[in-house]
Amino acid sequence: MKKTCLVKMKAGQKGLVVEFSGGSAIRERLMSMGIYPGREITKLSHFGLRGPVTIKVGRSVVAIGHGMASKIVVETE
């Protein structure tokens, strides 16, 4: 398995959240959306060059900004 940021994943690819490279504010915001270390997420789509990233977390679909998505470190197969 290799570590990469969420932005570099392909659409439809699954990964396990390993850590956040941001501060406590980003960590709290992501955890309030159900994104936390140890959780499996699926990248659904990525709009444009620096547009929002749509992911599936559990049974929820969440769109997050490009900057926030780049701070999520994911372990992929």
Image (cartoon, rainbow, N blue to C red):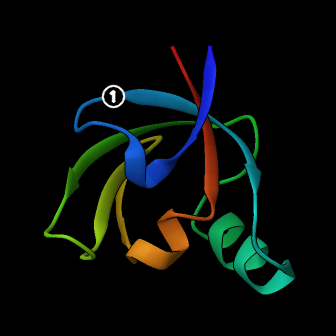
The answer to whether 48 is drawn above or below residue 11 in the figure is below
The answer to whether 65 is drawn above or below residue 20 in the figure is below
Q: Is residue 49 left or right of residue 74?
A: left
Query: Closer to the camera, 59 or 65?
Result: 65
The answer to whether 60 is drawn above or below residue 16 in the figure is below
Q: Is residue 18 left or right of residue 62?
A: right
Query: Closer to the camera, 33 or 13?
Result: 13
The answer to whether 31 is drawn above or below residue 11 in the figure is below
Q: Position of residue 49 (x, y in %)?
A: 20, 70
Residue lying at the far left in this picture: please name it.
48
Q: Amino acid at mark 1?
A: Gln
From the image, which quarter does the N terminus lie in?
top right
Q: Is residue 21 left or right of residue 42?
A: right
Asked whether residue 4 appears in the rendered view, the answer is: yes
Residue at image mark 1: 13
Query: Closer to the camera, 69 or 34?
Result: 69
Q: Residue at x 62, y 64 (%)?
A: 71
Q: Position of residue 26 (x, y in %)?
A: 71, 79
Q: Residue at x 76, y 71 (%)?
A: 27
Quarter of the view holding residue 4: top right
- How packed mark 1 is, by other alpha carbons closer than 10 Å (few <14, some 14-19, many 20 or more), is some
Secondary structure type for disc 1: loop
Residue lying at the far right in this picture: please name it.
24
Q: Position of residue 47 (x, y in %)?
A: 15, 66
Asked whether residue 60 appears in the rendered view, the answer is: no
Residue lying at the far bottom in this picture: please name it.
25
Q: Position of residue 69 (x, y in %)?
A: 49, 64
Q: Is residue 31 left or right of residue 40?
A: right
Quarter of the view holding residue 3: top right
